[in-house]
Image (cartoon, rainbow, N blue to C red):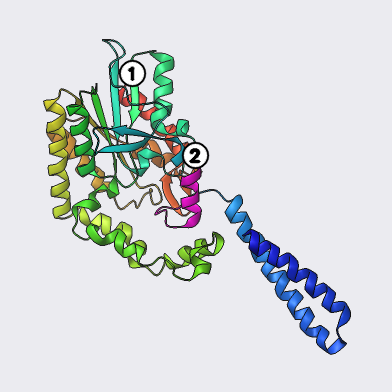
């Protein structure tokens, strides 16, 4: 970028000097060059804005702008939890996972899930619903609860099961496990998921102007999303999964997680997040929430559905932005209040 700016400055000086020295016939070419310079300067200014000031994410985090956001706001604050020399996880939290219990009465609650729980698009860790909940509980019931968020973007129930196995094997004090469902968690139970993100990667731009910039890269993906079926029809695919074998397979894995928690005397609870971008009277996933409620009822698992909490506030804006359907800070605040009332009243 510095080289480009230097080249632009030098070309301007050259064009201005030549304008004074050339004949009137040749001057038209100098004027054309100056016009082109002005256009390129304007585009450079736009690129600088998106490179330095524009600071947000997109749903699939495919753009350079979104990747920059994660590098600035998430990566520096990640913590490492190692189970042995070969395995471990990175998690986003303001404290380390407690290895021992503070006192006999203290309850340790672990939240697991994917990007909705992780805080995709939420800059401050303290603005996530888990951290808001922890602060509120500490203010009203000091020392009673320790809340740790071990979620990560793109994780699924298989990962959750393996993580809990490691926690229990390592004798970490876990009294309650709260699994936060994002409705696309089901996609891992469909065969096409094995190649889904590999297929998406094939649409990454090859030309340097679309690949190595911020503004042009962003515009490339904004336009391409309407032409790529895997993105355009993504939510339709997800909805179809709940009518077939993937839903049965997901229930089986939920049963495995429940059995694992029960064997280690930890209580499993489930929170179901709705998709926020199309939450309304014609919300296509409403009956899917009923399916989760039925699963919880049949197994006597306490399940909190967030539709009633979030739907009344849709008009005020609950997503990170128009191109990122993850919950924003407002949604996280509403969810934290609801969780405290529904799951921590005892």
Whether residue 319 is in magenta: the answer is no
Whether residue 61 is in magenta: the answer is yes
Quote the CA–CA distance across marks 2 and 1. 25 Å
Left or right? Give the position of 93 relative to 9: left
Q: Position of residue 213 (x, y in %)?
A: 54, 62
Q: Which residue is mark 2?
A: 123
Residue furthest top as drawn: 104
Q: Position of residue 130 (x, y in %)?
A: 38, 30
Q: Does residue 210 sit above or below 130 in this rendering?
A: below
Q: Position of residue 166 (x, y in %)?
A: 20, 32
Tell me, yes or no, if residue 339 can be seen here: yes
Label 2 SS: loop
| Quarter containing the N terminus | bottom right
Q: Which residues are magenta?
A: 58-74
Between residues 317 and 329, which one lies in front from this camera angle?
Answer: 329
Q: Which residue is mark 1?
A: 145
Q: Position of residue 50 (x, y in %)?
A: 58, 55
């Amino acid at each position: 970028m510095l080289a480009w700016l230097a080249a632009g400055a030098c070309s301007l000086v050259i064009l201005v000097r030549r304008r004074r020295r050339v004949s009137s016939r040749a001057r038209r070419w100098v004027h054309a060059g100056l016009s082109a310079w002005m256009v390129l300067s304007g585009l450079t200014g736009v690129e600088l804005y998106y490179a330095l000031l524009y600071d947000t994410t997109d749903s699939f985090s495919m753009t350079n702008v979104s990747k920059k956001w994660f590098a600035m706001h998430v990566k520096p604050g990640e913590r490492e939890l190692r189970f042995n020399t070969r395995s471990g996880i990175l998690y986003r939290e303001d404290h380390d996972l407690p290895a021992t219990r503070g006192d006999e009465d203290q309850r340790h609650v672990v939240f697991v899930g994917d990007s909705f729980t992780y805080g995709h698009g939420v800059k401050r860790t303290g603005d996530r619903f888990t951290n808001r909940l922890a602060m509120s509980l500490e203010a009203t019931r000091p020392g009673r609860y320790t809340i740790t968020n071990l979620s990560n973007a793109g994780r699924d129930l298989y990962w959750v099961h393996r993580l809990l196995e490691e926690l229990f094997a390592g004798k970490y004090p876990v009294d309650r496990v709260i699994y936060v469902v994002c409705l696309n968690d089901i996609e891992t139970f469909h065969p096409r998921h094995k190649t889904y993100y590999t297929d998406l990667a094939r649409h990454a731009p090859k030309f340097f102007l679309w690949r190595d910039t911020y503004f042009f890269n962003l515009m490339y993906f904004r336009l391409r999303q309407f032409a790529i079926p895997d993105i355009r029809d993504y939510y339709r695919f997800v909805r179809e999964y709940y009518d077939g074998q993937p839903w049965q397979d997901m229930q089986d894995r939920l049963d495995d997680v429940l059995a694992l928690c029960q064997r280690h005397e930890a209580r499993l609870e489930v929170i179901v997040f709705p998709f926020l971008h199309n939450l309304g009277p014609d919300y296509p996933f409403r009956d899917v929430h009923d399916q989760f409620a039925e699963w919880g009822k049949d197994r006597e698992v306490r399940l909190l559905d967030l539709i009633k909490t979030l739907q009344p506030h849709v008009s005020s804006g609950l997503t990170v932005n128009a191109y990122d359907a993850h919950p924003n800070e407002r949604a996280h605040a509403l969810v934290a209040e609801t969780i405290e009332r529904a799951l921590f009243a005892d």
